Image: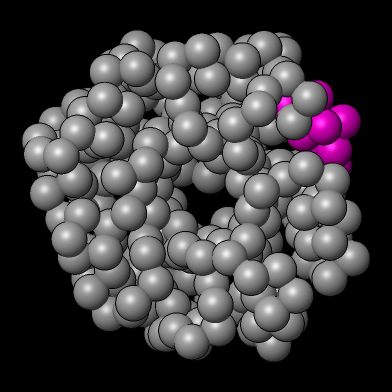
Amino acid sequence: MILFPAIDLKAGKCVRLLKGDMDRATVFNDDPADQARKFAAAGARWIHVVDLDGAFAGKPVNGEAVRAILSAVDIPVQLGGGIRDEGGVAAWLLGGVSRVILGTAAVKDPDFVKRACKSFPGRIVVGIDARGGRVAVQGWAETSDMLAVDLARRFEDSGVAAIIYTDIERDGALQGPDVAGTLALARAVRIPVIASGGIASMEDLRELKRHAADGIAGAISGRAIYDGRVDLAQAIRLLEAPTC
């Protein structure tokens, strides 16, 4: 199982939000590239990056910070936030990003996501952010009527590399991940699922790893790492070990 340390970008800085609220942002590092280097030094094999401003604006905003991260580390980076068209997907994937995350686009234009999967096999991730089991879009500002499981099933045979499932009410709240919801989604599709939101301890990671055989392939953690509740190097060793 892969642990993805998270860098969320707001106004060029590395922040964490509480439950997706842009007005409740805590700055953890003014230099995202420096943060990326710290993650790489701790043994991270991937870095998860989200352009928060871009997610709300519907177009990339923190491109300079993303490019600085790409220049700072040699490990793969997956990027989401404000990528809504084929030109944006191609620009980032050809510009050094290893995987692009499509969230709002997956709800509003699933055919675009499927075309992207064909153009860039194994490099498109679908981000499913849910509130009360229903998918949220536009940087979590809007909640749709679509169930998370139904959205995931749309892309079952499209070549999606992974699904990132985020429980918005837990994100940044350190209340523990939605293991039941993530597990239900992982069992409903054959696409690998990455858990996101709420991780607060090593025990949370152990609980997710217990379900690796059910399709939970990774976990994203941000605030718990920044707060020191989870030691990144130790957590990576835990998830990469054959057993808990």
The answer to whether any part of residue 230 appears in the image is yes
Task: Classify 140 as above or below 133.
Answer: above
Q: Quadrant of residue 150?
A: bottom left
Residue at left offset 16%, top offset 55%: 211
- Determine the main secondary structure of the stretch shown in magenta: helix
Q: Is residue 218 magenta?
A: no
Q: Residue at x 61, y 39 (%)?
A: 76
Look at the picture and state if 44 lies above or below 55: above
Percent coordinates x, y for residue 153 in the rendering: 42, 85
Tell me which segment is drawn in magenta. 61-69
> Relative to residue 28, is residue 197 depicted above or below?
below
Give residue 135's position: percent from left, percent from top. 48, 70
Q: Is residue 25 left or right of residue 72?
A: left
Residue 32 sits in which quadrant?
top right
Residue for point 10% across, 35% down: 244
The colour scheme of the drawn protein is one colour
